[in-house]
Amino acid sequence: MRYRTLGSSDLEVSEISLGSWLTYSGGVEADQTRGCTEAAFDAGINFFDTANVYGRGAAETAWGEILSKHPRDTYILATKVFGQMSDTDSGLSAEQISKQIDASLTRLQTDYVDLYQAHRFDASVPIEETVEAFQKVVEQGKARYLGFSEWTPEQIQAAIDIAGPDLFVSSQPQYSMLWQAPEAEVFPLCEANGISQIVWSPLAQGVLSGKYKPGQPIPEGSRFASETMGVSKDRLITEPILEAVQRLVPIAEGAGISLPTMALAWVLRRSELASAITGASRPEQVHANVAASGVTLTPDVLAAIDEALGDVAVKGPELAPNAQTGVKHR
């Protein structure tokens, strides 16, 4: 496993990290979560990413029980705040950030998280209030560093203008061969301010595994066969996309690697990335994902990938799911 520095922090995170979204969605039982987490440690993964909203605390609770069996200095833990935790609890007000960090730490059975992230931007709250509340979390020792997920360039710049480029060390956008939108504006703005990318859905929710075939039924037991797990199904399960993915298969075979390995290596080719967040329901999937660390794709392979994708990849600035535009000031 190779490691990269997370932004301007002193954290060295594994190129492949483990996320707990599958726990939230009901796709992974407790024993599976434990097996995948232990497999991650065995494979050299030291970076674990979750969120309070995943199962309204269920994912954090599961990892709190599992990770507490490991020395705290052997892993880097990230969680997020923003999502709907109750009828009255959501967003990035000072009150919510203060309340939710304490609840997350209790569930995670730890005194601090290494990275505390705004899960989305809250355009209903003055950004000054949100920034000050996050800074207070760090001052209190409850988080070492701060990050954000799916903020627009305007929102990122507004926060930097208030608190400087050292406020955040990470950005967590969706990024894959099929969703290249962050390359246009988010990547360069963050790089100029010492902010690393830790990307989610690098395998496009499993589509880049190649298991979904054009003209064939969705495989039983797969993510898109589930009503609760199959978000973005209408966008990703289309004939043009599935045909393009099948054109990628022989390219991976020619390079002597699997399609998922090629897809993960493709996102890791960018120096702006610190880590690619992967999900897993079985330990063997964890080890398969880790195989991408250190893989370098040749210029010929990269060119062949571009040709195979054609025009199905989302490029240029585009909002991710549940992202908001605009900035409110005091």
Image (cartoon, helix red, strand yellow):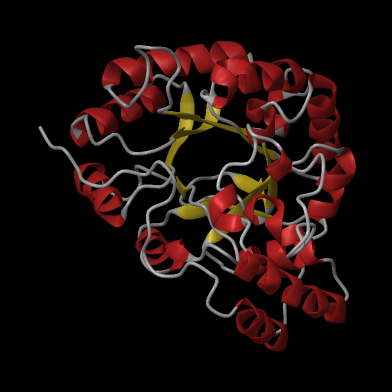
Image quadrant in which you'd find residue 274: bottom right
- Which residue: 51% across, 24% down? 53
Residue furthest to the left in view is: 330
Question: How many tags in the picture?
Answer: 0
| 141 vs 88, nearest the viewer | 88
- Which residue: 63% across, 55% down? 204
Instruction: Please indicate whether residue 185 sits to the left or right of residue 29 in the image.
Output: left
x, y percent for residue 30: 79, 20
- Which residue: 32% across, 27% down? 92
Instruction: Please indicate whether residue 196 sits to the left or right of residue 131 in the image.
Output: right
Q: Does 286 sit above or below residue 53?
A: below
Instruction: State which quarter of the image contains the N terminus.
Output: bottom right
x, y percent for residue 113: 54, 27
Instruction: State which quarter of the image contains the C terminus.
Output: top left
Residue furthest to the bottom in view is: 300
| 207 vs 79, nearest the viewer | 207
x, y percent for residue 289: 79, 53
Q: Does 111 sit above or below residue 268?
A: above
Image quadrant in which you'd find residue 137: top left
x, y percent for residue 166: 35, 46
| 241 vs 216, nearest the viewer | 216
Q: Does 192 sit above or below residue 155?
A: below
- Which residue: 45% across, 70% down? 315
**Residue 279 in sight in this render:** no
Instruction: Please indicate whether residue 239 sits to the left or right of residue 10 in the image.
Output: right
Q: Does 247 sit above or below residue 149?
A: below
Instruction: Please indicate whether residue 280 sits to the left or right of residue 116 in the image.
Output: right
**Residue 168 in sight in this render:** yes
